[in-house]
Amino acid sequence: MDLLLNCDLGETSNSDQLRIESQVMPHIDQANIACGFHAGDALVMDKTLSLAKQHLVAVGAHPSYPDTFNFGRQSMSLSSPDLIACLKYQIGSLEKAASDNDLCVSYVKPHGALYNDMMINGHLRSAVMAAIVDSQACSTLMLQATADADIHKKEASAFGLTLYFEAFADRAYQDNGALVPRNQPGAILDKKKMLSQVEQLKQDDSVTTINGHRLSLAADTLCVHGDNPEAILQIRQIQAILSQ
C-alpha cells in the first residue's frame, strides 16, 4: 500500500515550533493547515503555506469548531447552517491565503472534536460535506478509515466529493476501529509500537488493536505529528518504512 503522509501544521505562532515545522515539511505529502478557529492566524497561515509551496506539499484546510479556548477539542452543539457557515469561513480564509501564494486548497480535514464527532454522526458528516461543496475550494474530504468506508463513499458521492481515508501512526485502535480515547491508558503509542504499526499498515493493510486483534484498514494517507523535535526523526523513520 502506498501511503501519503499528512501532518497538522500552522497551529502555533511560537518561533521554536515554526522551526520544527520547517524541518517537518520536507518529509510529508500533505499539510493540514489550521484556519484560525482553534489555532493559527493569517500570519501563521501565510508562513505555513510558503513552506508548503517551497517543498511541493499539498495543502489542506484544517477547520474546527469555533473553540480556541479548548484548542477545538471540546464538542459543541451547532445547528447545521451555523456549522456550515463556520466551516465555509475557515476554508475560505485558507483558500484566500493559498491563492495569494499561488497555491490551491486540495482537501479538507476537520480538526479535533469535530473530526471525532463527524465520524459517529451522519448529520454532522453531511454538514461538513455541504460546507466543502458550498466553499467551492476543493472536492475532497479526509476522514478516518473504518469498516464503514463504503457507506462514507456513497455519502460523499451524493455530494460530488471524493475521500481520503486516513490511518494514524501513533494512535491505538479499539476492536471496532475507533481510536482509543486520549484519556485512556495506551491511547498514544510509544516509538517502537508506532513504527511497528506503520510497518503493519505498509505490509498488511491492517493494525493490531489494543486487545490484540487484527483490524483491516484500507487507508490512503497516514497522520503523523510534527509538534516536537523528536517528531522530525520519527517522521523520517516512518518515511523510510513506507518507501521500502
Image: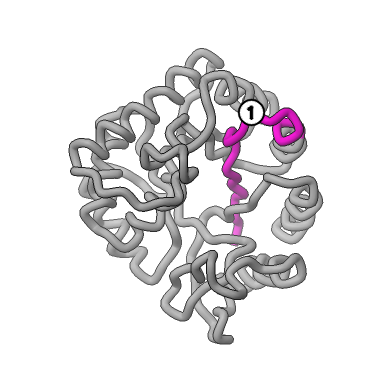
Q: Nearer the viewer, residue 77 or 102?
A: 77
- In the shown orientation, is residue 158 left or right of residue 217? left
- The quarter of the picture where residue 238 lies is bottom right
- Residue beneath disc 1: 13
Q: Determine whether 111 is above or below 91 in the image.
A: below
The stretch of residues the image draws in magenta is: 1-19
* Residue farthest to the top, as pictured: 100
Q: Which residue ends up furthest to the front in the rendered image?
A: 69
Which residue lies at the image location 69% right of the left edge and 24% below the top edge?
Answer: 54
Residue 206, given in percent of the width and then of the height, sits at 56, 73
Compared with residue 122, is residue 66 higher up or lower down, i.e. above or below?
Answer: above
Is-magenta flag for residue 13? Answer: yes
The image position of residue 111, as x and y in percent, is 45, 46
Check the image and tell me how it is coloured: one colour
Q: Image point 25% across, 49% down: which residue?
A: 77
In this rendered view, identify the residue nearer to me: 93 or 52.
93
Q: How many marks?
A: 1
| 16 on left or right of 91 | right
Q: Secondary structure at mark 1?
A: loop
Q: Amino acid at mark 1?
A: Ser
Measured as percent of width and height from the top left, residue 177 is found at 45, 73
Residue 35 in the magenta stretch? The answer is no
* Quarter where residue 199 is shown: bottom right
Front in this rendered view, residue 137 or 168 = 168
In the picture, the quarter occupied by the N terminus is bottom right
Question: Residue 160 at what x, y percent from top left?
Answer: 26, 42
Q: Is residue 41 left or right of residue 125?
A: right
